[in-house]
Amino acid sequence: MCGIVGYMGDRKACPILIKGLHRLEYRGYDSAGVAMVNADGNLNVFKCRGKVDDLEEYLKGKDDSGTIGIAHTRWATHGVPDNVNAHPHYSESENIALIHNGIIENYRVLKDALIQKGFNFKSETDSEVLCNLIEYIRNEEKCELAEAVRLALNKVVGAYAIAVLEKGNNDQIVAARQSSPMCIGLGEDEFFISSDAASIIDYTNEFVYVNDGEIAILRRHEPLKIINLENKDAEFNITNLDLSISQLEKGGYPHFMLKEIFEQPDTLVDCIRGRVSPETAQVILSGVLDNREKFIAAKRIIFVSCGTSWHASLIGEHLIEDLCRIPVEVEYASEFRYRNPIIHSDDVVIAVSQSGETADTLAAIRIAKEAGAFVYGICNVVGSSIARETHSGSYIHVGPEIGVASTKAFTGQVTVMAMLALAIGKERGTIDQDVYEKIAKDLLVLPEKMTEVLRQDSNISDLAKTFTYAHNFMYLGRGYNYAVALEGALKLKEISYIHAEGLPAAEMKHGPIALIDIELPVVVIATSEKTHEKTISNIQEIKARGGRIIAIIREGDTQIKKLADWVIEIPALCDYLMPVIAVIPLQLLAYYVAVYKGRNVDQPRNLAKSVTVE
Ligand code: F6R
């Protein structure tokens, strides 16, 4: 959570920092701030509660000069979102300014020790403690800033991506990383720092990803220097990132979320491109081919993920058990990591993450690697921590997802899982050739089927008006569609703040049926051929109790059409792939309900896109 950005070069720093913050606002948006050293060596910090727009307003008339600066957009962990807790933090003497993304776990002990030494604290944050610790060490040891940062970080337990400036020095930024993302962008005699390379892609496409336990020392007119916490030089590679600026703009849509929903036919083309042959319907996934033996020998597959990625993993479980006959477990990464899980060396652990930075998923990967499992990643963000820490993997290639509610990542993840199941099933000889070809051919037509669903946009918008004032929603699905029900419910609650519950349809009668009345809209995802009759029974049970049904059905399903109060018909595909298009009406329904309720769709309250804290 939190976004950090930095700049040093010949240009004025402030506009670059502000633009970077706007791009990083998806990571947190409760307060924002900048620190710059001007030509006279003054270290100015400007920060306020609110969004980056509020900071821009606040900066009017202030000294925003200087060609060096750091900036931060916050998602509060320690201390309420207000002007004081906003970053950057000054050290006590105001000689040092620091921005921080992460959590310093031992900050209380450090704070008490610093108070004993006479330090005073203005904020409630753990970050101010680190800033003062650096100042204390700098004064005690009479050392350079970079050395003070290194010594301070040796005393810190926790997660951080930090950048530090000092008064009187407009030629240096010191930055460091432990478990929170950070990259350095390289320009012509200029440096950029960011939590996310996409935020600075306007200026450079050459990046160095800072690794855990490394400190980057950026000095004007000098090459980048990276050291580790033991003060040894660290080697680094320059990565070229192929990303266009248009991918980061709204492109005429009122919200990123709507743009990202409508992008899905194209993102699926990118996801499938080069992996399913249109001529032979063969699926080629290099990650599977390169690790053939691991997948053939796998006794079990364990998915680790969170949120929407966890929902996609539930669909992965069905796909792999059905097509590869390998037992699968799906774990919340946050539970897995603290449960002392039993992991064998012939387990394959699949980590699923859009951002590739989710702290719990990263921790789960590390546990699995330590236990000797082979770890495969399904990620979106190229070069992200999870992509780098897994043994191998497949990118979903859906482009930057900026709306906080995940949409195109979900459909990309499920599509990759379908290709993965086909590729592994083929290698293991567990998949019938006809089934293989049917799914592969359906994968190729997925984008056009999705376009057909998106044509119902205005009907779904009308439907959403009917439900804008509902207080609760229930979503039901069976088999593959249970995960779709969970995902539909999550979309609605996170952006409209309406309570919604996703359930396996048959579970309803074990308790939740008590909730059914005319006030409760029930969304039934009824596209599965396999469970069609059973789902009809569930619908009848709801109708018998006065419930109102919105059903997502296969085109031409007259039986459910007669029973439901509203239907959204979607084209038919094999059951394995129906979730990829069945989720589209639910994304649109959530979107329009939130819009009619006047919610901030792209930046819903209390949320941030990338959860880099536990
Ligand atoms: C929901 C949403 C979150 C994320 C979750 C995992 O719309 O976006 O539930 O899915 O925080 O994030 P990643 O996939 O980046 O690991």
Image (cartoon, helix red, strand yellow):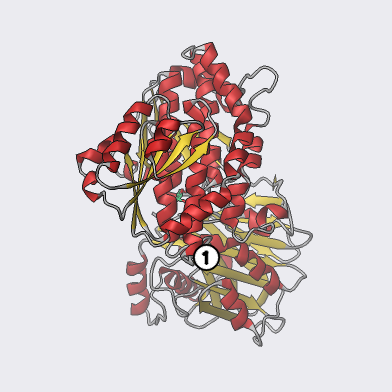
Task: Name the foreground residue: 73 vs 587.
Answer: 587
Q: Where does the image place residue 195, in percent across and percent down from the top left?
A: 57, 58
Task: Name the foreground residue: 50 vs 268.
Answer: 268
| Number of marks present in the image shown | 1
Q: Amino acid at mark 1?
A: Val
Q: Where does the image place residue 391, in percent across and percent down from the top left?
A: 52, 33
Q: Where does the image place residue 162, in percent across and percent down from the top left?
A: 53, 63
At a point 46% along the width and 31% down the height, the residue shown is 557
Q: Does residue 84 lie above or below 146 as drawn?
A: below
**Residue 566's image quarter?**
top left
At a point 44% along the width and 25% down the height, the residue shown is 320
Q: Does residue 297 lie above or below 219 as drawn?
A: above
At a point 74% along the width and 55% down the height, the residue shown is 204
Image-based side of 302 in relation to 447, left or right: left
Image-based side of 479 in relation to 441, left or right: left
- Quarter of the picture containing the C terminus is bottom left
**Residue 96's image quarter?**
bottom right
View extreme (front): residue: 562
Task: Name the foreground residue: 162 vs 150.
Answer: 162
**Residue 55's image quarter?**
bottom right
Q: What residue is shown with label 1? A: 149
Query: Is residue 168 something that shows in the picture?
Result: yes
Q: Secondary structure at mark 1?
A: helix
